[in-house]
Amino acid sequence: MNLILNVWRQAGPKAPGKFERLEAKDISDHASFLEMLDIVNERLEEKGERPIAFEHDCREGICGACGVVISGTPHGPHKATTTCQLHMRSFKDGDELWIEPWRATAFPVLKDLIVDRSAFDRIMQAGGYVSVNTGNAPDGNAIPIGKDVAAKAMDAAACIGCGACVAACPNASAMLFVSAKVSQLGLLPQGQPERYDRVNAMVAQMDQEGFGSCTNHGACQNACPKEIGVNFIAMLNRDLRSSILCPSPKPKPSTGEGA
């Protein structure tokens, strides 16, 4: 199949960017979307031209590195499908595609289709962890947890942090990502001691990073390749309200007695 690609090209974070029109000829419909870009890059390099910079890692749909916007839709036209799992048989011969990076102030473009998603890392550093000793794997299996609770925690843990929710949201909100990470820990007994401090710290860091507010558009759950639902945003909001009514107990300062 033959395609026309309009690819966002930007040499660096401060360089001006623009769409560049490229031809992708004789592409197998069995190729993945990233393999198609590999073929285009090989041909660009053969001509001595700069290849398209795009991020990728596992190519198994579990790392989220591959995310780009394809003709206006994060990760492309199929639901619950990452860009690396998208195959060219999803398109028709002669199609014209527009390929661009995530668009958000908190995700500055580094080069072409690559954006800086370290804002997500800083949100996780603010509270996305447990500090209690959870023991080894056998200890985890020894703690009884209801099936419904375990299933919800597993659903939240499916978030791969790709940023498609931010790219799809008209406000560039990161609420779906943050709510999934907050809920994953807040549902389990190991995450209870810091539950309310965690949600406050992660939401404060999200605001500091420049992500927009959630206004219930729901575009985030439609774009999520792991089908994370907005019900987790509701859980996050409930925890925020509860943190005001039931703040976590603060440790008493040491008096030095008994030292």
Image: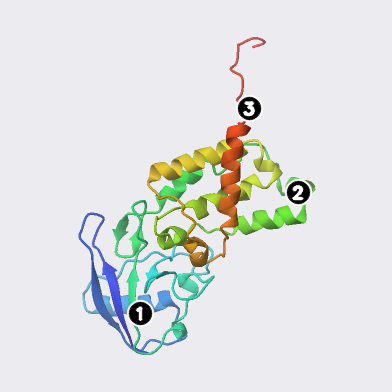
Residue 203 is situated, as x and y percent measured from the top left of the image, at: 49, 43
x 40%, y 55%: residue: 172
The amino acid marked with disc number 2 is: Pro
Q: Which colour scheme is used?
A: rainbow
x 47%, y 63%: residue: 219
User: Farthest top residue?
Assistant: 257
Q: What residue does disc 2 label?
A: 138
Label 3 – label 1 distance at C-alpha = 57 Å
Q: What residue does disc 1 label?
A: 39
Q: What residue does disc 3 label?
A: 249
Query: Upstream in the sequence, badge 3 or badge 1?
Result: 1
x 30%, y 70%: residue: 52
Establish if 4 lies above or below 202: below
Q: In screen coordinates, is 246 left or right of 206?
A: right
Q: In screen coordinates, is 173 left or right of 145?
A: left
x 64%, y 9%: residue: 257
**Closer to the eye: label 3 or 1:** 3
Establish if 192 lies above or below 141: above
Query: Which residue is more in the foreground, 158 or 248?
Result: 248
